[in-house]
Amino acid sequence: MFGRDLKKGSAELLVLSVIEARPRHGYEIGKLIESRSRGRIAFRIGSLYPILRRLEDRGLIRGRWVEKPGEHRRRFYRLTPEGRGFLAEQRSLWEQFVATINQVVSVRRV
Amino acid sequence: MSDWAAYVRERLHVGGLRPECEAEIVEEIARQLEDAYEDALRRGLGEKEAQADAAAHITDWDALAAELRESPAGRMPALDLLVERAADRRGAQQGMVGLVAGIWRDFLYGLRLLAKNRGFATAAILTMALGIGANTAIFSVINAVMLRPLPAKNPSRLVLLGWRTTARYRPNLRMLKFYGACSMEGFGLGPEGHVESAVYSGCSFSEPFFHEIERANILSGAGAFVDLGTTYLSGIGSATTADAEAVSGSFFHILGVKAAAGRLLEPSDNTPSAAPVAVLSYGYWQSAFGGSRDAIGRGIQLQGLPFTIVGVTEAGYTGITPGSDYNLWVPLSDYARVMGWPPGRRQDDPREWLLTIIGRLKPGERRAQAQAAVSGLFGNQMLHGATPLFIDAESGRAPSVASRALASSGGEPELTITPAQSGLMGYRGLYANPLYLLMAAVGTVLLIACVNVAGLMLARANARQKEMAVRLALGAGRRRVVRQLLTESVTLSLFGGALGVLFAYGGAHAILSFVGNAQLAAVGSRGPIHLRVLGFTAVDPRILGFTLVVSLFTGILFGLAPAFRNARVDFTPALKEGSRGATNSAHAVGKWLTLGNGLVVGQVALAVIVLVGAGLLVRTLSNLRDVNLGFDAHHVLSFGVRTPPGLNGRQWEVLNQELERRLAEMPGVQSATNNTWWRLLMGVARSTLFHWPGTPADERSEADELKVGPNFFSTMRIPLLAGQVFSASDFELAATDEGAKPSQTPVPVIVNQKFVEQFVRKGNPLGVRFGEHGPTSHGPASPGYEVIGVVGNARLSGPRERMRPLIYEPSRGSFFELRTAADPRSIVPALRRAVAKVDPDIALFDVTTESAQINQLLFRERLMARLSGFFGLLAMALACIGLYGLLSYETSQRTHEIGIRMAIGAQPEGVLWLILRQGAALAIAGAAVGIGVALGVTRYLGSVLYGVRADDPLTLLGAAIVLTLVALAACYIPAQRAMRIDPVAALRSE
């Protein structure tokens, strides 16, 4: 429902946030973002996967193949210490940004 | 859908990633699509819908692939990409193209391996670069000095005429002109006087013979030239000197030399009645006339004789003889006039052997044909002409018809025709031996480098045994494996060669500038040869070709042994056992180590040979430097003067005395003197024959003679041992005209100590008279000489000369020596002013210091000592690196064994000794072999050595000991590493 640009700008923040608590695999990350946003933000695998690769290249997350009994192996991503720092920083920036935008946008004086 | 992986593989083409990385991506995306599919099924979609739902997650596969390609992780190295592409094309190619593609693939594979083994690759490439670079550098110098084509059109068709005769016949000549145009035999002076040569040869001919050759129409053209030396040139600004040559009218035409301005000499110029003309060299035209066309038609005076400049030779032509650097040329017919010959002496006298003759072969004719034709002419004219030019040494008559029948025994004089390119020697004669010796030295260095890299390759081949076994087991042919390994070694050597060219570029420039800076005094020639005429271009296709061939050859040479080793691998045990097992099996140890050890012994031996050679040459130089010259060469400035021609003896004497006085008065000059004939320290001497009292009447004794001016002994600091030095009246007497001399007064002479030892022996030398004789066919009666003084021995010709008896006669000369208080060079400007004050028409030439002159004389020795010393050190370094590499490698292979030894009680010192012992054994074995070979090889150095024998034990042993010690130091590092092995860690590593 949100535009492509909005989504693109915040995608990394969203991915990092959902694996903050514990490692998750690729499809799970997408589903979680969708459910937490109550279906308003949905990533297709084709767009999410390159984001994961990029984050991993930058050393912010790290993927590891995990095989559970009775299941195919899946790649689980977790935050690296750098990723954790980056997330904290981005989160605070985001909050300031939202607050600032709100200050401007919510004033309806002419 | 059951196989999402296949689904993804079919659609996603990332490319450029490592295969394992690409597989991972496919798997992960497939897994996610499968999750999505199962999720859809759980949401209650039908199978088809669920599939469509999952598939909708990725619609633009190309965009996805593009995004993934940007990820740096997993990207394949560029080299591997090339290999992959080469492999992709493999199937389509067969035959020659397939082979080339295969070698290209091997090359790329080799590059990839080298990129992975950077340490090995760096060591091997550097080693090869040093070896190849040294060879390319010396070859560049040889190319510039020896192989440079003559400055003529189509020089391969030019031939040089020469003659040979045995001692039975000798040339019947009045004068033989020789100035280094070709190599001559039999005319040199040996250390003990005349060389009793079995063969005489030369390339000088008389003018009548040259005209015979011209008329005979055997060659398509013949030209002749003769050196005029340093001539006095006036008419352009202040008086100066110029190096001149007289050439026949056809000379430039035969060479194909063009005029840069005006015209060159023509046959019509070469007649006694023709107006005297001269041709300038391009360089001289530029420096003396600024390249102005007004120079054409101007008049100049050469030795006071008028000449008109008619043209300028093309740029780059300075004379046909290699190293010659002439300023101008005049017609041959002017030779006698310019040289100032007395009226009775004619240059067309058949006994004046002046000319060097060159010719051009007729189109399509071979040298042998021309040789046969000219020989016939020679036989008739030279032996049986009106004036026989060779005479029987015993009878003094021309060879008779009967003796001609003996010609089959090879006793008769013969004419030779050689290619001018190799026959015209010039300075080449001076450099040939040193350069080929150095080439041998760098060749040996390259061999060491090859052996060194072969050792490295062997060690690595060992580590790659398993890889090779896998290749062979998978069906690769042995030929295929050999090709792979050879391609790798050639790749290495090509890199080494490329780097070597860079080294060589710097090296050759350094050598040639060293050569060029030394204005070498050419022994036996007319004067300093200007080496700036050496051309040197780094990007010479011949040099690059040489390097390429050497690189390929060495690559194959050092790759061959390891390659065949590896192709013979018995792959079953190699595959079964671990890496340690494979190398430590008794079979492997026996073979590998023997070869490895052999390589090291070979390297050490080769290095000893190069070191011994270098040691001998360095000692030669140091011996020559330490030679007691017998006079003080420091702080002496020397130069020659040319006075205006036409002065009579008296006028010249007055002018010379005035010069002496002015020079001695110059500030900074302590004393001044002069001598006749030539500059001192030129490597030349003049000898005289005389009768010594008490010997048989027809016996002639021989000594060197030198005419010296006043203050010679004090200026040169040659000690007077007995008697007195020349007085003013002695010089007065010497300057008196021949006819006015008192006929009974002997010439007062001063002799050196050697003269006294050899002739006077016991008794008082002072007052001894010798050399008087009655009138002979050669000249009038002579009152001979009387010894008035004895001076110390002095090597005035140069340090290499053997001390010979020497007679000093009083006479002023035109070669001056000034002893100065400070650096002699600093007074040169003042010197020019002082000389100009005496007479502005006096020209100075060859201004130099005696110390510089000694350096020039020793130039070859300095060049050889310096370069061979450098290459000797290089050889030693390479051999030590080889030894170090082998021991390091073996120590690392024996870690386990050493661990066990230490675990069961071996002391670290024992381990150290274990490794050192092996290194020492190898080094000593190599040194012993090296000494043996060096004994056989160094005798070829004999002719260039001085004061040291070719089998000098001190040098031989010294080189061997130095090398062994340095080698032991190289062994110490791996030995110490072995000593520090922790037995527990060593055993656990298994």
Image: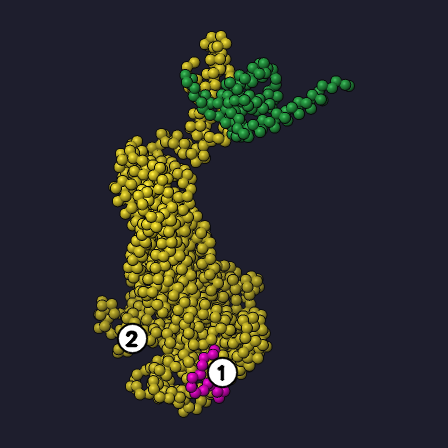
Q: Earlier in the sequence, mark 2 or mark 1?
A: 2
**Residue B292: image location, x then y, percent:** 57, 62
**Residue B924: image location, x then y, percent:** 31, 56
Q: Nearer the viewer, residue B253 or B38?
A: B38
In the rendered image of the structure, the colour used to display chain A is: green
**Residue B702: image location, x then y, percent:** 35, 80
Which mark, residue B622? none
Say whether residue B405 is left or right of residue B229: left
Name which residue type carries label 2. Ile
Chain letter of the residue carrying label 2: B
B715 up-or-down from B498: above or below: below
Figure quadrant of the N terminus of chain B: top left
Q: Give the residue at mark 1.
A: B710
Label 1 SS: loop
Q: Is residue B21 magenta?
A: no
Q: Is residue B720 magenta?
A: yes
* Residue occupying the point 58% across, 71% down: B829
Mark 2 is surrounded, within 10 Å at the Cα level, by few (under 14), some (14 to 19) or many (20 or more) other residues, namely: many
Label 2 to label 1: alpha-carbon separation: 44 Å
Q: Give the residue at mark 2.
A: B391
Say whether residue B269 is left or right of residue B602: right
* Residue occupying the point 36% across, 46% down: B978
Mark 2–mark 1 CB contact (< 8 Å) = no
On the question of residue B532 being in view, the answer is yes
Q: Which residues are magenta?
A: B716-729
Q: Nearer the viewer, mark 2 or mark 1?
A: 1
Q: Quadrant of residue B86?
A: top left
* Residue occupying the point 44% across, 28% down: B21
The number of callouts visible is 2
* Residue occupying the point 42% across, 34% down: B80
In the rendered image of the structure, the colour used to display chain B is: yellow
